[in-house]
Image (tube, rainbow, N blue to C red):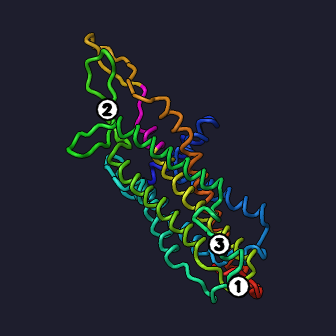
Amino acid sequence: MNPEHFWNVGNRMLQAPLPELVWGLLSSSVVCAVLGIAIAFVAARVRHGGPSGAAVARVGHAAIGVIALAVGLVWIGDIALRGYVIDMSAAVSRWRFALAPVVAAAGVAAWAVTRRATQPRRAADAGSVTRRTWVTFGPRRGLVALLVAMVVAVGVMVVFGRMSTAFEPGLAAHVAMEAPNVEAPPVVTVFPGWAYGIPLLAGAVALAAAVVLALHRNAARPFPDGVRLDLERRGRADAARDIVALAVATMLLMLGGVLRLARSAAADTMTVQMPSGHLTSVQLALPHADLIMVGGIAAPMLEIAGSSLLTLLVVRAAAAVHARRRQPAPPAEVRV
């Protein structure tokens, strides 16, 4: 971008009122990502204060932190590429909201298929032979949150898809807003219609399937011998929690992006020239305008929450690996 552009933006920010300045900053996904990362570091510092024995017990889950880092880099890299390197404001990037869920699904699926017992199978006992399913170690509240996020995402994409307009064959990625009782062409803007929604829904389905697979493999694989049963169960519960948190964070980021794009595409008024030659502003008719406005307010909060969750997973994994390197492994560590 032109350096003069940044200079002008900086001057406007210094002269703007505080509420307008705050909202202007939150209108950037990059700023929301920075805020989410900062909140995560503060929360991790306040909660743990530093590496601990519990962190060492979770060292086997460092791969989940790597997946979270990959998802975050893909998300922020796509935003930086489209917003600051290549001008794609008028282009239709069908995989814009599906890329991160696909990366998360691929990583979680790879994590699931590589789960192997590192020690001989545990001798049969009441704890190890109990029937285990994908919900055995899954966090109940986390699974409910994931289900709610996916249901909301599906509902929003269906609503936005029905609102969208296809100006080219097979492409529904715009919305046409008309002014009632005014002879003027409609205002057409890029909108998260079916062109964005179908890939996102496919990515969400793939992510949900990968999460179920990972939770099933995490619960059903045999307990290893030589590891205390309570520690083994705690390790599997930690892994299930991190997998679900990763999926929730990914869906929050994508839902926030969809709502942000819908809000940026919505217009309240348009200026038309009357037969007398005078210019006047008229109201535009936009279906589900209230949903779009509320979604525009919620979008920054969803992105901050999603980036915070991803950062917490990365910080937790890094702390566990760091603690493992500094401290000798206990004789009964959890290996998952």
On-image quarter of the N terminus = bottom left
On-image quarter of the C terminus = bottom right
User: Which disc, if any, is residue 317?
Assistant: 3
Q: Tell me residue 23's x, y (percent).
A: 58, 40
Could you tell me which secondary element the residue under label 3 belongs to?
helix
Q: Is residue 105 visible?
A: yes
Q: Nearer the viewer, residue 190 or 64?
A: 64
Could you tell me which secondary element the residue under label 2 belongs to?
strand
Q: Tell me residue 208's x, y (percent).
A: 49, 59
Residue picked out by circle 1: 325
- Up the image or down, 156 lies above or below 306; here it is above
124 relative position to 190: left or right: right
| Magenta span includes 201 | no
Amino acid on which disc 1 is placed: Arg
User: Which disc, if any, is residue 43?
Assistant: none
- Up the image or down, 262 lies above or below 64; here it is above
Q: Are marks 1 and 2 in contact (CB under 8 Å)?
A: no
Give the mark nearer the N terminus: 3 vs 1.
3
Q: Residue at x 58, y 70 (%)?
A: 64
User: Which disc, if any, is residue 176?
Assistant: 2
**What secondary structure predominates along the stretch shown in magenta?**
helix
Q: Residue at x 65, y 65 (%)?
A: 137
Amino acid on which disc 2 is placed: Ala
286 relative position to 113: left or right: left
Q: Nearer the viewer, residue 293 or 158?
A: 158
262 relative position to 330: left or right: left
Q: Are marks 3 and 1 in contact (CB under 8 Å)?
A: no
Task: Name the residue at the left extreme.
Answer: 169
Residue range (magenta) = 259-268
Q: Quadrant of residue 171?
A: top left
- Up the image or down, 213 lies above or below 162; here it is below
Q: Residue at x 63, y 86 (%)?
A: 121
